[in-house]
Amino acid sequence: MGEMTFVAAAREDLDEEMARDPSVFVMGQGIGARGGNFNTTMGLFEKYGPERLRDVPIAERGFVGMCTGAAATGTRPVVDFMFVDFILDAMGELINQTAKLQYMSSGRLTMPIVLRGCYGIGRASATHHSGAYYPIFVHLPGFRVAVPTTPADAKGLLKTAIRLEDPVLFLEHKSLLNTKGSVPEGEHLVPFGEAWVARRGTHLTAVAIGSMVPRTLEVAGRLAAEEVSVEVIDPRTLAPLDIDTILESVHRTGRLLIVDETYAPCGIGAEIAAQVVDRSFDDLDAPIRRLNGLHTPIPYSPPLEAAVVPTTEAIAQAIRDLLAE
Amino acid sequence: MAVEVLMPRLGWTMETGSVLAWHKHEGEAVEVGEILLTVQSDKAATEVEALESGVLHMAVGAPPIGAEVPIGTLLAYLLSPGEAPPGETPARAPAATLPVAPEDGSAPPPAATSPAPAAVAGASGVASRADRQAHDGQVNIAATVAAQAQAAASPRARRVATELGIDWTALRGSGRTGRIVERDVLAAALTAAAPPRVRVTPLARRRAAAGIDVESLAVASAGGRVSQADVAAGVRRLVAQRLTESTRTTVPVTLTTEADATELARLRAEIKADAGHSTGERHEGDARDERSRGTGGDGGYHGGMVPSYTDLLAKVVAVALAAHPDLNASWSDEGVVRHSEVHVGIAVDTGRGLFVPVVRDVARKPVAAIARESAQLIARARAGQCTADELRGGTFTITNLGRYDIDAFTPVINLPECAVLGVGRVVARPVVVVDEAAERVDVRKMVALSLTFDHRIVDGAPAARFLQRVKHLVEHPYLWLTR
C-alpha cells in the first residue's frame, strides 16, 4: 500500500496492464517520448517503445476510428485525449461505430477500448479545455463511464476499464491529478457500478460527482460541527450507476442533494433524481435538490471560472436549505 | 373501512334534524364514545357520540351548520388513518370545487355551478343526497378541499405516519412551506396516546431498565429504533418531569438544624479501624464518602463493611420514623397513606443523571446489611444496571451533598413520598457545649440536616419534632445501635 498521486496511480496501473497484456497499447498526442501532457504515460515509452505508445497527429476522428478497428480485431487500445474536450471531434465515429459495433455484429465483435482524458475546471484552461461531457456518454447506449476521485480508484477503475470488453470513457479531473492517497499494489480492481460511501451521515444524502466529492466532503466535515450529519456518496461510475446505494441512503436520510460540476439540463442529477423519485418516492421527506455548474461555457478568467461551478459555500447553503425544507 | 356518520333519529317523531356543532375538526382522530357532534331535533339539542373510532372527514355535500336535513343524511365519515373517503378521489374533489371557489372571490353564476357537484356526486353514488344538498354543499366542499390543500405532507412523512399509525392530516407541518415532514410525524408519535411498535437496541433497553419508558421515547429513526442517546435524553426528561411534578403538586417546607455528629463520627471511625485490621481492600462505594469507605473480606464486627454517613442516617431515619409515622406516608386521592415499612431511597449522582435506588425495610435491618445493600445499589445505579424495581417503592429519601462541602440546602420531595432529608458535610467546628452546668467551647464535628416535607401531609410542628428526633439520634448513636 503506497502513497501516490492520482496520476501516478493511474500510470502505475497502465504500466502493469501493458506488462501483463501485450495487446494493450496507447494512442494519443504527445503520449510517446513526451510522456503525455498530464504525465499519464511518463516513462512508458522507454519501457514499451513506439509500437505501443503511438503519437498521433491532430486528427481525432482518424485515430479513434483506427483504434475502433484495432479493438474489433482483438487488441486493447487506450486512446489518451489529453484534454477530453477533443473527444468531440470524434463523436461521429464513437457514437455510430465504436458504441454500436457489438450490437451490429450481434456480439461477434467486442470493443475493449478505453477513452481517457482530463476534464473539468480548475486550471484556467479556458473554454475549449475545461469541459466535462459525461452526461452525453451516459445517455448513449454502449458506453461505460468512470469518474474516479481518489488515487486508489484511479488505479482500480482503470484496471477494470482496460479489461472490460466494452468502450469505457475514463475521466480524470484536472484538479484531482495531484491529490495523494494510499493505493493498493498489484491486482487492485474496482468493479464498475459500485458506489463508494465516502462519509456516513444521517440527515441528508449528498451524491457528489468527480471534483465535487472532496469539496462536498470538506463541507460535510465542517457541518458536522453544527450537528449536521451529511452522508456523501461518490458513484465512481456513472454508467453503470449504483442507484441501489443511493436509494439505501435516501431511505435512511429522506433528503437528497446531487452536486455536479457540469450542467443541470439532462444531466446526471436529473437522472439520479428521476430514478429516486421513481423507486423511492415514499422515502423522500423533501424535494430532491441539484447543485450544478452554471449553464454557460467555462470562462477563462480564474475568478469567473471558480464562480460558475458549485463552491463550498454554495454546497453548505444548499445543504442547509434542503434540511429546512 | 370508512364508517358513515348519518343524521341520527333521536326520537320516534324525529324526521329531520340539523347539526348545531361539530366537536371534532376535519382530520381529527375520534375515539369511540367521544362526543362527535350536537344535533338539534324537533325537541332538544342532543350530543351524539361516535359509534366507531376513526379520523373525521366531512362528506362531500354534507349539510352546513344549522341546515335542517332528513334523518339518514350523510354528514361525515370516520376513516382509518390514510384511508381515502369512499367515492371521493383526490382528482375528483378539486374538480368539484373549480366552479364554486373562483379565484376572484365573486359569487359563481348558479347555472354553471349547480350541475358540477351533482355530476360529481352522481359518479360517486350519492347523487340523491348530493342533489338535495347541492346548494348548501358548495360551501362545505370548498372548506374540505381547503383543509386538504393546507396539509401538504412529504411522501416520507405519509409513509412513516402510516407505519406508526399516526394521522398526519391532523398535524401542523414544520417544513419551509408548512409541509408536514417526517420530524413532525415523529414528534406526534412521541406524544401519541397509543405508542407505536418500538424497536429498542439492546444497549438502550438495558439503560432504560431503570424506569424509563422506551415507548415514550419512540422513534428516533425511521424504523422507530430507540438508541442509547434517546434513553439518556429520556432520563433527563423523566427527572425533569418528576421534579416539576413534585414542586407543582406538593407544598414543600424545608427545616434545617445542626446536629453534633461527633459520636457518630467516632462510631464510624471505630468500625473502620476494626475493618482495617482484616483488609486493606477498597471498592467503589458510596461516592458521597468514597475516601473513608473501606470494605473487606471477612473480618471485623461489621464484616469489613464500613457504613457511610448516609447508611447510618438511613438507620437513624428509620428509627425516628417509627416514632413519627406521619412522615413515612404518601398523599393519594384517598388521603394520607401511612406505610408500615421504611424503604429509604438514596439519591445517587450518575453519569446519566439522578437515580434514587431504594434500600428496603431499613427499620428491620442491621447497619451492616444496610451498608452492604446500599453499596451494591449505588454501584449498580452508576453502571446503569438498576432494575425498575430497585428504583421503586421508597417511602423516604436521603440526599447527601456533604462530599461537595455543602452545609444546608432545600432538597426536593421525591413523589409520592412525604419528606426528604438533605445531609450536609460533617465538619469540625468550635461549638459551645454545656457540660455539668458550665458552658465551654469545644471542637465538635457538626452536620447540617435539611428536612423538606409536604405540608399537605404533615404540619410544621410534627415535622420539626421528627427532625429533632433525628438530631437526637445522630448525637446519641447508642440509642439505636441495638435496633
Image (tube, rainbow, N blue to C red):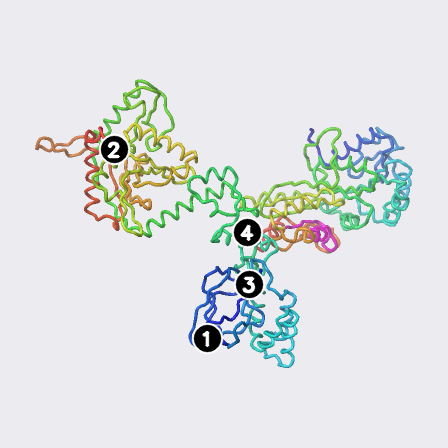
Q: Answer yes or no: do the residues labelled 4 and 2 have beta carbons within 8 Å?
A: no
Q: Which residues are magenta?
A: A256-275
What residue is pinned by disc 4?
Answer: B164
Q: Give the mark nearest the N terminus, 4 or 2.
A: 4
Between marks 2 and 3 in the image, the one whose residue lies nearer the viewer = 3
Same chain for the residues at labels 2 and 3, yes or no? yes
Q: CA distance from mark 4 to mark 2?
A: 57 Å
Mark 4 — on which chain does it sit? B
Residue B249 location in percent, x, y? 32, 52
Question: Which residue is painted at 21% across and 41% down in the image?
Answer: B324
Mark 1 — on which chain does it sit? B
What residue is pinned by disc 3?
Answer: B3
Disc 1 residue crowd, few under 14, some 14–19, many 20+, Cα 10 Å: many
State the mark number for residue B427: 2
Disc 2 residue crowd, few under 14, some 14–19, many 20+, Cα 10 Å: some
Question: Which residue is painted at 22% across and 32% down in the image?
Answer: B261
Q: Is residue A68 left or right of residue B76?
A: right
Q: Is residue B22 left or right of residue B116?
A: left
Q: Give the mark nearest the N terminus, 1 or 2.
A: 1
Between marks 1 and 2 in the image, the one whose residue lies nearer the viewer = 1
What residue is pinned by disc 1?
Answer: B41
Does residue A8 appear anywhere in the picture?
A: no
Q: Answer yes or no: do the residues labelled 2 and 3 have beta carbons within 8 Å?
A: no
Q: CA distance from mark 1 to mark 2?
A: 79 Å
Q: Give the mark nearest the N terminus, 3 or 1.
A: 3
Q: Is residue A262 magenta?
A: yes
Same chain for the residues at labels 4 and 3, yes or no? yes
Task: Label 4: state its secondary structure.
Answer: helix
